[in-house]
Image (cartoon, grey):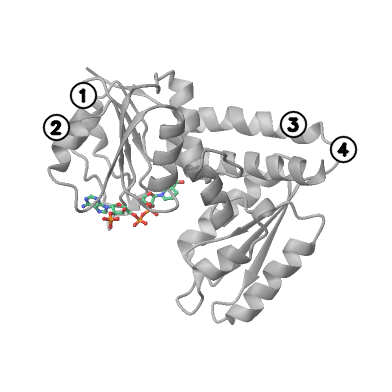
Amino acid sequence: MTARIIDGKAIAAELRAAVAARVASLPFTPGLAVVVVGDDPASAVYVRSKDRAAREAGIAAHTIRLPGDTPEVLLLAEIARLNADPDVDGILVQLPLPPHIDTDGVIEAIDPAKDVDGFHPLNVGALASGHPALVPCTPAGVMKLLHHVGVQLAGARALVLGRSSIVGRPMARLLLAADATVTVAHRSTRDLPAECRRAEILIAATGRPEMVRGDWIGEGATVIDVGINRLPDGRLVGDVNFAECAERAGAITPVPGGVGPMTIACLLENTVDAAVRRRA
Ligand code: NDP
């Protein structure tokens, strides 16, 4: 079998156009504030893309850049200012933060109603209890890809490879909410290839370049590669060996051009959702 390639770029473009149309119909302009501490080059690329995409959708985007040695107390003061600003509907603090800053404390300082990354404990708890409010953008984007492909989720055997709080865990919760039968795999999982082969839907989010091999894939499975890894030779690859896995999968996302563009599109959607809910 040669897999159908899931074109995340095109699907994200559709979603962004829908968000832009929704923004155009609103009597106000939603506002998004992105806070960046330090000058991590990878973060700079993401932040530029988020900023551009937000502006194209008609969202008022502001990037607040703080030096890498900003004391935590000043960052918290900036977040308090954004929480109180009526024109700001969404606040995103670009991760990772420098090591002298307590990341959990910063996330907890964000007004949960403006937490467009969906990382605040209240939003995490809402998702865990089946009452999602603002859902983390990457897993939300994966769900949209799965719906777009038309995969039957109810009853499907889904394996989430990785259990981070920003991808793996919320991914598993969303799949469970869609009635999939969900397994979460991690470093202590025994016989990972066999676990993967049983999956009808495989979501890879490990940060290990091309670790999922072709013979880990069940015939006809849907494979979603969340990974973004830069190799020493400059190539960008996922957590899945694309060429090998495309031979066995029914459908597969490429890297780049799969999940990445969906993450940004879902951030825009979360910002508009937060704006509409807050200003209702
Ligand atoms: P983390 O490092 O936070 O988590 C990685 C997870 O993978 C952990 O749960 C870890 O297990 C598991 N893991 C790592 N190595 C192995 C292994 N050899 N066998 C089994 N499990 C393993 O990463 P993130 O969740 O933040 O990111 C994952 C990937 O997704 C990265 O490539 C990242 O760049 C990408 N990403 C892409 C986004 C997008 O927009 N497309 C957005 C966010 C992330 P354990 O818990 O046991 O340590």
Disc 4 versus disc 1: distance between alpha carbons?
49 Å
Secondary structure found at label 4? loop
Confirm if mark 1 falls within 8 A of ligand 1: no
Type of amino acid under label 3: Arg
Which residue is disc 3 drawn over? 22
Nearer the N terminus, badge 4 or badge 3?
Answer: 3
Nearer the N terminus, badge 2 or badge 3?
Answer: 3
Give me the residue at 21% from left, 24% from top: 248
Type of amino acid under label 4: Pro
Nearer the N terminus, badge 1 or badge 3?
Answer: 3
Residue 152, percent from left and from top: 39, 18
Q: Which mark is residue 248?
A: 1
Query: Does the image show residue 190?
Result: yes
Give me the residue at 68% from left, 67% from top: 79
Type of amino acid under label 1: Arg
Dot 4, how many residues are within 10 Å of its Cα: few (below 14), some (14-19), or many (20+)? few
